[in-house]
Image: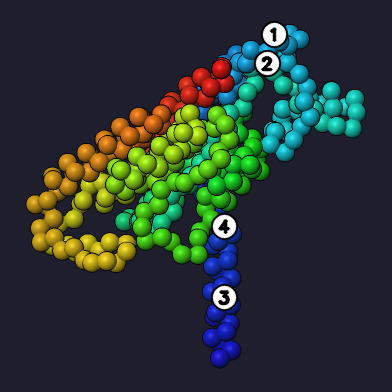
Amino acid sequence: MRHRSARHNKSRLQNGLIAALTPLIMRHRAEDAAGGLPALMAAAEKAVTTLYTGDHRQRKAGSGEKFWQFREYDSSDRPQDIDWRQSAKGDRVFIRQKEWQTAQTVLFWAQNDRGMSLRTGHALASKHETAVILSLGLGLLLTRAGERIGPMVEPARAGRSEMALQHLGDALCRMPETLSVTPELPRAENLPRQSSIILAGDFLQSPDEIDRALGVLAAQSPHGLIFQILDPAEHDLPYNGRVIFRPFDDSRDYSIANVPSIRQAYATRLQNHIETVKALARRHGFGHVLHVTRDDPRHALSTAWQILSPQLQQDGGK
């Protein structure tokens, strides 16, 4: 009995340690994905010239070409933006705000149901892990460009600080007590005005369901982007011979006697669905990036950055 109790406590300790380390592991993988990204180098170059990605002109008078005003520092600001000379004059800490600085708010959602746990290779991340990696990678780029980021479920906690990035990782990695057996779609109300939305999931639901979900979000947000994430097995159907497929809801088994005989039809149907999701995204003002979990996430991040950056610049110039 004592041996069983000790083994149970050890198991609980291991599970707790894994749960505590998961956000940190995801963060490190996201930093690795974003670290070598050419778009990040381009953004860094703009930071030291006149086209700092994330700093957008606003038509307000200021006392000089760039300087607009001092404002008090808050927890969403980066420490490197503090004006220490002005802050030394009193007891408060100030930010030197420039006339084109209008930080945009970018909110993230990552699909998290039983289907997103799919992982068909030991060296691959699951679809949900990949959704978190891509979200955090893009979040890193955005915060370094001065934008505000946060989870869509808690938009009030969006910010530009290290704490905001950590909070985003925690929210996206948070696991529900029970994973839904049916595919999730994003739902949100009362999003911040002029915010942009990043959605990461497999988007294998019916086109009508996707259309309705995007319509609700587009009515609140002017722009957004979809990461459509697939496992290689879903993308390529690489099996041979007779295979039994079982849905995540365990509703019934599907037996295919000769998988190669349906591979071309499957590929055509999947490609048609992907093109439909892409068209729906475009119609609602969202960009679309397809990513297969075996691929280098830097390619998806680079494409996403190229899509999202002009949207944010356009909003900031209004």
Read off the residue under disc 4.
Answer: 21
Callout 2: few (<14), some (14-19), or many (20+) C-alpha neighbours within 10 Å? many
Between 315 and 76, which is closer to the camera in this rendering? 315
Callout 1: few (<14), some (14-19), or many (20+) C-alpha neighbours within 10 Å? few
Read off the residue under disc 3.
Answer: 10
Between 136 and 70, which is closer to the camera in this rendering? 70
Camera-near label (4 vs 2) is 2
Element type where label 4 sits in the image? helix
Read off the residue under disc 2.
Answer: 99
- The reply to whether callout 1 and callout 2 are in contact (CB within 8 Å) is yes
Which residue appears at 73% of the width and 11% of the height?
62
What amino acid is labelled 2 in the image? Glu
Element type where label 3 sits in the image? helix
Q: Is 118 displayed left or right of 313 in the figure?
A: left
Residue 235 vs 89, above or below: the answer is below
Position of the C terminus by quadrant: top right
Read off the residue under disc 1.
Answer: 65
Q: Which of marks 1 and 2 is nearer the N terminus?
A: 1
Query: Which quadrant would residue 245 be assigned to in this image?
Result: bottom left
Q: Which of marks 4 and 1 is nearer the N terminus?
A: 4
Toward the right, the furthest residue is 90
Query: Which quadrant would residue 158 be assigned to in this image?
Result: top right
Callout 3: few (<14), some (14-19), or many (20+) C-alpha neighbours within 10 Å? few
Q: Is 42 displayed left or right of 82 in the figure?
A: left
